[in-house]
Image: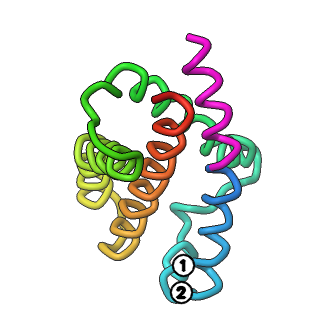
Amino acid sequence: MRKIITSGLIGGCILFPVSYGGLYLGVKFFPGLFVAYNNPLFNSDGSRDLLFYLHAFIISFALSWFWERFKSLFKGPLVLRGLEFGLVYALTALLPVMWISFSSLDINLVMVSSWFFYGLAQATIAGLVFAKINP
């Protein structure tokens, strides 16, 4: 349990600036992609903003548990293990969620695709961190 918590905290501390830095750069370099967020579906009164900012830690703890449970299945060098971990997460968790989101919400394919690749990048980075600190 200690390894899961430690890895989750370290992963969250790394994912937080990488994730929000990536969002900042995305808005800066691909502003057209983010125009779709001017939709009532995404407007919040601000009462749940903390939950949004804790996302990097929540996903890091969940992925840390997943890593601890299944790390023996990921073989090879660190980069390959991290990439495979990210792909497994993306295909088993993200793809079904993105499918149901796209089919049931008023969002476009570009938006859902960006979420998929954002989640894939987060999981791959987390996999690299976990492979390094908790082989």
- Which colour assignment does the render follow? rainbow
Give x and y (percent) for residue 59.
52, 38
Q: For the residues labelled 2 and 1, say whether their Cβ atoms are less than 8 Å apart.
A: yes
- Local crowd at mark 2 within 10 Å, few (<14), some, or many (≥20)? few
Task: Report which residue position mark 2 lands on.
Answer: 30
> Does the stretch in magenta take in 84?
no
At label 1, the amino acid type is: Phe
Residue under the image location 70 percent in, 43 percent down: 13
Prevailing secondary structure of the magenta residues: helix
Q: Residues within 10 Å of mark 1 (few under 14, many from 20)?
A: some
Q: Secondary structure at mark 1?
A: helix
Q: Position of residue 36 (x, y in %)?
A: 49, 78
Judging by the rendered image, the residue that carries numbered circle 1 is 34
On screen, residue 14 above or below 35 = above
The amino acid sitting under disc 2 is Phe
Residue located 55% across and 21% down the image: 4
Residue at the spot x=35%, y=28% of the render? 71
Left or right for 96, reference 16: left
Secondary structure of the residue carrying numbered label 2:
loop
Measure the alpha-carbon separation of dots 2 and 1: 7 Å
Residue 10 magenta-highlighted: yes
Specify the quadrant of the image occupied by residue 93: top left
Which residues lie in the magenta part? 1-14
